[in-house]
Amino acid sequence: MSKRPILTAILVATMAASATSAQILGGSGGPLGGVTGPIGGVIGQVGNTVDRTVGTVTGQPNNPSSFVNPSNPVSLDSVSTPLAAIAAPATLLSDIRKARLAALIRANRDTLDRDGEGQPVRKRELVVTDPDPASLALAQRAGFRILRDEQAGDLGIRMITLSLPRKMDVREGLKALRKAAPSLQADYNHIYEPAGGALLPATAAALAAAPARAGTRIAMIDGGVASHPSLARAGIEQRGFNGSAQPTGHGTAVGSLLVGEQGPFRGAARGAQLFVGDVYGGNPAAGSATAIVRALGWAASKKPSVINISLVGPANRTLARAIGVLRARGMDVVAAVGNDGPAAPPQYPASYPGVVAVTGVDGNNRALREAGRSTHLDFAAPGADLAAALPGKGYTAVRGTSFAAPFVAARLAATGSTAALAGEAIPGKGKVGRGIVCGTCEISPKSVGLK
């Protein structure tokens, strides 16, 4: 069947409105919340592949850009990939990804540029890691200037952000820097985004710090976590790495899946101490590689057994260095593979060696068709028809690998090793790595009163 009939059927089933709807699917709080979330709860039918959607997606089958809202191309509270496109061919998902990233750059021209592959990067700056004095001097003689010179928290990594000589764009700058000082570990300052979605920066208050608990420690690098009844008794400490921590739907949802507890809603690692590094500060254009590395340095100082990263982006030398240090210290890193389909390039940090790469499965234990890919795949966990906390109160339905990753992180923290985790994994359908873990961890939307 051609793309057009498939997409026409999908799009007829959706109601026209904003194009940035998504994998946070419903908004009605139900008896445990009673609050309508930022995304409405209109339910539709889309063939037999996707049985739940929100009436806020529109798009033209042969125009991937039409799935992207130019005024708000990537939201920390709305999903990257429109739900209407999930049942579409993988090549369209990849095209939507490219259009989404291009729109993010256009919407943030003052701060963002693109690398040679079209990935968003910080404008007019490059990052070098652990430079030797001689090479740094060569770079300065070539016209590069030091903007920031910092240590990445507890990681022992020196990061230097360089400004470019005049009249150079960032692509020209990287070529010139590598020519002037070839020994430098230089790269762009890439921007990373939630691995398929979130909920506009939330109006709810950020969750106040709670005292540390003895026992399991888990860290997450994401947007900020909002106050919510399910998190009222959780031990959560958060810090912002682009200004003060700002609550987002994505961060709140991921945090609740880890340590939330309210009535039938029970996070997979409830009782654990959770450390949240907010790398956005409410701004989707702010989640840079350097911010993530700073957050990882802080997280490492808390001595967690597992760090969850439900973010995706390209390979980056500075981020790779930080991941390598964490792994050398015995800290497990769990990361989502994203939701841009198998035709998109491998995503990072999930693709780095030693990182536990996670995909999602539906209620039939079948791999999500919109799941992205990495250079390796370790485990799968429930990633569809899940309930998660809305900022403030209430719950919403979520879908995507972002929300599968915390389940794997919770079980890895409990079992203590990937070998033990593999021992409890069960087979699935499609590409699920070594199997599905935490298969009974999901809380269905109906159980918290969502329809």
Image (cartoon, rainbow, N blue to C red):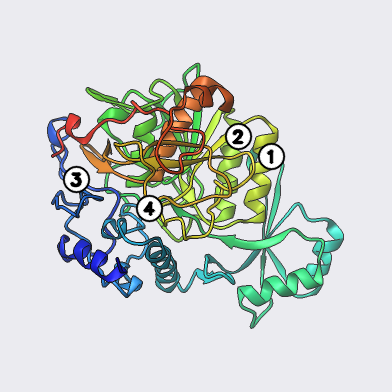
**Total tally of numbered discs in the picture:** 4
Q: Which residue is mark 4?
A: 370
For label 1, the crowd category at 10 Å Cα-Cα, with few meaning under 14, some 14 to 19 and many 20 or more, is some
Mark 2 or 1: the one toward you: 1
Instruction: Indicate the position of residue 221 as horizontal and vertical percent values.
Output: 49, 42
Q: State left or right for residue 136 relative to residue 245.
A: right
Residue at 35 percent of width and 65 percent of height: 73
Residue at 40 percent of width and 52 percent of height: 339
Q: CA distance from mark 2 to mark 1?
A: 10 Å
Q: Secondary structure at mark 3?
A: loop
For label 3, the crowd category at 10 Å Cα-Cα, with few meaning under 14, some 14 to 19 and many 20 or more, is many
Q: Which residue is mark 3?
A: 27
Tell me if residue 225 can be seen: no
Amino acid identity at mark 4: Glu
Q: Which residue is mark 2?
A: 300
Q: Earlier in the sequence, mark 2 or mark 1?
A: 2
Amino acid identity at mark 2: Ala
User: Disc 4, disc 2: CB below 8 Å?
Assistant: no
User: Disc 2, disc 1: CB below 8 Å?
Assistant: yes
Q: Which residue is mark 1?
A: 325
Q: Earlier in the sequence, mark 1 or mark 3?
A: 3
For label 4, the crowd category at 10 Å Cα-Cα, with few meaning under 14, some 14 to 19 and many 20 or more, is many
